[in-house]
Amino acid sequence: MSFNTFGHMFRVTTFGESHGVAIGCVVDGCPSRIPLSAADIQRDLDRRRPGQSKFVTQRREPDEVRILSGTFIDPASGAEVTLGTPIALVIDNVDARSKDYDAIAETYRPGHADYTYDVKYGLRDPRGSGRASARETAARVAAGAVARKILPGMKVRGALVQMGEIEVDRKEWDWDEVARNPFFCPDAKAAKKMEDYLDGIRKKGSSIGAVIEVIAEGVPPGLGSPIYGKLDAELAGALMGINAVKGVEIGAGFGAALLSGEENADEMRMSNDGKPKFLSNHAGGILGGLSTGAPLVARFAVKPTSSILTPRKTVDRYGRETEVSTKGRHDPCVGIRAVPIGEAMVACVVADQYLRHRGQIGEPVDWPFIKA
Ligand SMILES: Cc1cc2nc3c(=O)[nH]c(=O)nc-3n(C[C@H](O)[C@H](O)[C@H](O)COP(=O)(O)O)c2cc1C
């Protein structure tokens, strides 16, 4: 069985290996007549692209996306819009230095997927880590850019909230700051500390983990399906599917274990627009697997990059004990570039849930049922 597809009504299939001809995706189920151009997708890809600061890998991948199918110039408006047919997006691989990977072609990097791919498939493409490379995530970011356009008014934003031992101060949170520093960090002071911290780690040839928070605003109440299709489960699955992710939390997450029932209860009041509002959001915008209308809040932990310069004990394909250290160009903290990837996965899940909700329920329910 293979699983390169996710989503039900908004369905994304990605393809490609790191050093093959190209990577890309097919997005099926996108409604018709939604304005969509390559520039819309490129904006998101440029945020994930390597080589933009000394704190990320120096690979020079322009990550230029081409739309192969699924859009058309609408004669009525003159704008490029979706046709409702499969949208195929392709990104050429242009900075493949396959020689960098000769040393690990037969030796397994601890923490990477080399051994598991070999033991499952009987062979693997070691160049740039093949299909296990996070290069595949560029295709998800492209799909996420399409997903962002589906639910009117939805805004999905992500930020790096912890790098190793440096955590952001939530009182200092400023969304505008995220675009101003190379870490997608919402706290300017924490970002400053991260510079020296990560520089030290990078110079040692080591790496460090991170925590990313993604918040989706403008998500209407009622999205998701109770029990087996819980919105929280689908978000967790999608975020866990990102390379190097080892933990996901929704709302208060593991911190909920420390709260009392009174503290955890998100009390309700009516707001001026006739809709209920929650006085806190420990639930992360989800109750019973269904969105509450409050912002969706998800956090995920990214492990430190496995490709490091320090030699580590390992074995090779022939069962011999040896050591491996990885040369080549790597991110000292892959959590940084995981920010736009996390946003894309959340956007894809919410878009899928929105279309599923419309399919099942049709028009929104007229709430409150009895006017007071
Ligand atoms: C944006 C991003 C870039 C990554 N770059 C590297 C890298 O340069 N070297 C590396 O060892 N792992 C890198 N990874 C992580 C590996 O792709 C991942 O650890 C590997 O596929 C094994 O999968 P797992 O960690 O999910 O078990 C990266 C992950 C992300 C999200």
Image (cartoon, rainbow, N blue to C red):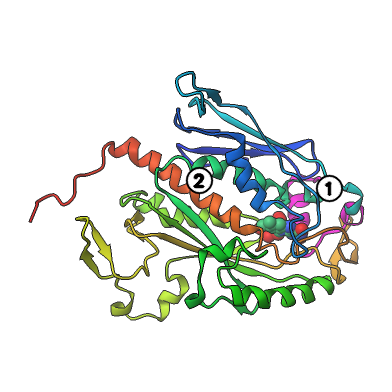
Comparing labels 1 and 2, the label whose residue is closer to the camera: 2
Quarter of the view holding residue 322: bottom right
Task: Bin the neighbour count of mark 1 within 10 Å (Cα to Cα): few under 14, some 14-19, many 20 and up.
Answer: many
Locate residue 272 relative to residue 30 in the image: left or right: left
Which dot marks residue 302? none
Ligand 1 falls in which quarter? bottom right
Residue behind mark 2: 348
Assess disc 2: are there few (<14), some (14-19) or many (≥20) residues with their C-alpha within 10 Å of its C-alpha.
many
Image spot of residue 266 (x, y percent): 30, 70
Pointer 1 residue: 127
Question: Residue flagged by tag 1: what amino acid is it?
Answer: Arg
Q: Nearer the viewer, residue 153 or 119?
A: 153
Q: Where is residue 69 in the image (x, y as percent from the top left)?
A: 60, 26
- Please check the rendered image and state whether residue 107 is part of the magenta-colored stretch, yes or no: yes
Q: Is tag 1's residue or tag 2's residue first in the polypeptide sequence?
A: 1
- Which of the image's four quarters has the C terminus? bottom left
Q: Is residue 335 left or right of residue 123?
A: left
* 173 is within the stretch colored magenta: no
Of 168 and 163, the residue lying toward us: 168
- The image position of residue 147, as x and y in percent, is 50, 42
Q: Where is residue 238 in the image (x, y as percent from the top left)?
A: 53, 52
- Residue 289 appears left or right of 346: left
Q: Label 2 amino acid?
A: Cys
Please say if 25 is above or below 57.
Answer: above
102 relative to 257, above or below: above
Furthest-left residue in this view = 372
- As helix, strand or loop, the secondary structure at mark 2 comes to helix
